[in-house]
Image (spheres, rainbow, N blue to C red):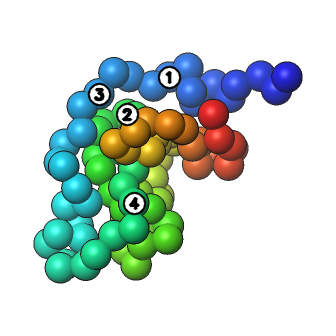
């Protein structure tokens, strides 16, 4: 079994800052699915969405781990490109 990366251990218990992708709402864009940053609670759209705001948030902030919302069925580490 593979050991989890150190970024999964750094996550905090955060709440989402919005119910949907704020950037998509401001730009009047639809999204496919949303993800929440486990460092600050930013909610952004997935890479299958036009805006790719969850990834853009990582690129701008360096916050490494996000979770699928609302079901929280999996997490993703951008640094190691690894699911949990």
The span from disc 4 to disc 2 (Cα, nearest Å) is: 19 Å
- Look at the numbered discs 2 and 1 and tell me whether their residues touch, using CB distance below 8 Å: yes
Label 1 secondary element: loop
Label 2 secondary element: loop
Rendered image quadrant of residue 49? bottom left
Q: At which x and y percent is residue 33?
A: 39, 60
Could you tell me which residue is drawn at 19 percent across and 78 percent down? 27
Rendered image quadrant of residue 39? top left
Residue matched to label 4: 33
Find residue 39 and name its label.
2
Q: At which x and y percent is residue 63?
A: 44, 42
The span from disc 2 to disc 3 (Cα, nearest Å) is: 7 Å
- Look at the numbered discs 2 and 3 and tell me whether their residues touch, using CB distance below 8 Å: yes
Mark sitting earlier along the chain (4/2): 4
Label 4 secondary element: loop
Mark sitting earlier along the chain (4/1): 1
Name, please, the residue furthest toward the right.
1
Q: Is residue 76 left or right of residue 18?
A: right
17 in relation to 47, above or below = above
Q: Residues within 10 Å of mark 4 (few under 14, many from 20)?
A: some
67 in relation to 46, above or below = above
Residue matched to label 3: 14
Residue matched to label 1: 10
- Look at the numbered discs 3 and 1 and tell me whether their residues touch, using CB distance below 8 Å: no
Given residues 15 and 31, the one toward you in this image is 31
Q: Residues within 10 Å of mark 3 (few under 14, many from 20)?
A: few
Q: Quadrant of the N terminus?
A: top right
Q: Is residue 2 visible?
A: yes
Q: At which x and y percent is residue 67?
A: 45, 40
Rendered image quadrant of residue 84? top right
Q: Nearer the viewer, mark 3 or mark 1?
A: 3
Given residues 50 and 72, the one toward you in this image is 72
């Amino acid at each position: 079994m593979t050991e989890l990366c150190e970024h999964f251990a750094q996550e905090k218990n955060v709440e989402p800052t919005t119910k949907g992708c704020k950037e998509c709402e401001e730009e009047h864009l639809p999204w496919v699915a949303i993800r929440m940053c486990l460092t600050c609670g930013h909610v952004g759209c997935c890479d299958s969405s036009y805006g790719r705001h969850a990834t853009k948030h990582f690129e701008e902030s360096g916050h490494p781990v996000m979770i699928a919302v609302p079901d929280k069925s999996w997490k993703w580490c951008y640094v190691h490109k690894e699911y949990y």
